[in-house]
């Protein structure tokens, strides 16, 4: 735990430098295929320090995260044995990888969307998507929608509500994620029903 705490503090320290936006991009990119600290941490700190730039920071985070997801996808697709398996093993998910493959066979875009928005480790899903040969356009669109929704929600709340939202988001992030998933499922059901 001490190592993760030092890593967390190191990530936060970038908010006090002129390289905060670049650090946010690199963090979002790397978190999508291997890094353990989610980009929300730096996004929240940067947005709270300059609320008028909240949407810009959300965009930077979204672009970095989706591009990182593409890297994760291609690691799973082309380099699973050399790179993907060690990452999966590092996170202790090798036993669950077979279940993850079944999840993709049954739910494909839904699995990516849920992992992209919730605190579920997105990196495991990006690598698994490639390893399972998930249709790339479906993967990309699902990642773009879910990751952007997650980061623009955080950026928007900070823009409109200001710094007190930081405490609220950190305290209720899991509940907010579940609410979003319910709304997303309801939205898909409504579209299917209307069509």
Image (cartoon, grey):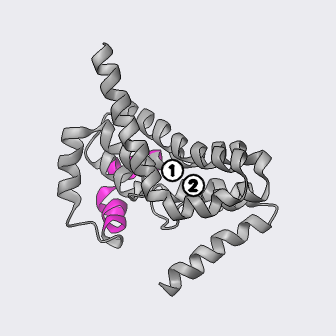
Q: Is residue 11 left or right of residue 79?
A: right
Magenta segment's dominant SS is: helix
- State whether residue 156 is above or below residue 167: above
- Magenta stretch bounds: 70-88
Residue 17 % position (x, y): 80, 66
Q: Looking at the image, which residue is at 37% across and 66% down?
A: 87
Q: Is residue 108 left or right of residue 46?
A: left
Q: Is residue 170 left or right of residue 53?
A: left
Camera-nearest residue between 48 and 5: 48
Tag 1: Cα neighbours inside 10 Å, few (<14), some, or many (≥20)? many
Residue 54 % position (x, y): 71, 47
Instruction: State yes or no: discs 1 and 2 in contact (Cβ < 8 Å).
Output: yes
Residue 145 % position (x, y): 48, 36
Q: Looking at the image, which residue is at 28% across and 18% down?
A: 193
Q: Residue furthest top?
A: 195
Q: Earlier in the sequence, mark 1 or mark 2?
A: 2
Camera-nearest residue between 52 and 144: 52
Q: Is residue 76 magenta?
A: yes
**Residue bearing mark 2:** 28
Q: Looking at the image, which residue is at 37% across and 62% down?
A: 83
Q: Looking at the image, which residue is at 49% across and 37% down?
A: 144
Quarter occupied by the C terminus: top left
Q: SS of the residue at dot 2?
A: helix
Q: How many marks?
A: 2
- State whether residue 1 is above or below residue 107: below
Q: SS of the residue at dot 1?
A: helix
Q: Is residue 99 magenta?
A: no
* Any part of residue 39 in sight: no
**Residue bearing mark 1:** 68
Gap in Å between the C-alphas at discs 1 and 2?
7 Å
Q: Is residue 59 left or right of residue 52?
A: left
């Amino acid at each position: 735990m001490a190592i993760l705490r030092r890593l967390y503090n190191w990530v936060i320290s970038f908010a006090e430098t002129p390289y905060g936006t670049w650090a946010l991009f690199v963090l979002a990119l790397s978190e999508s295929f291997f890094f353990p600290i989610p980009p929300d941490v730096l996004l929240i700190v940067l947005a709270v320090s300059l609320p008028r730039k909240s949407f810009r920071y959300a965009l930077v985070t979204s672009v970095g995260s989706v591009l990182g997801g593409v890297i994760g996808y291609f690691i799973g697709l082309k380099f699973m044995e050399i790179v993907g398996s060690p990452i999966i093993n590092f996170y202790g998910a090798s036993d669950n990888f077979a279940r993850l493959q079944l999840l993709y066979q049954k739910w494909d875009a839904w699995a990516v969307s849920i992992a992209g928005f919730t605190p579920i480790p997105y990196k495991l899903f990006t690598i698994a998507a490639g390893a399972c040969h998930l249709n790339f356009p479906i993967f990309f669109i699902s990642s773009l929608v879910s990751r952007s929704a997650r980061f623009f929600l955080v950026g928007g709340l900070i823009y409109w509500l200001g710094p007190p939202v930081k405490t609220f988001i950190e305290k209720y992030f899991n509940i907010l994620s579940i609410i979003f998933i319910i709304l997303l499922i309801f939205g898909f059901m409504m579209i299917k029903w209307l069509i």
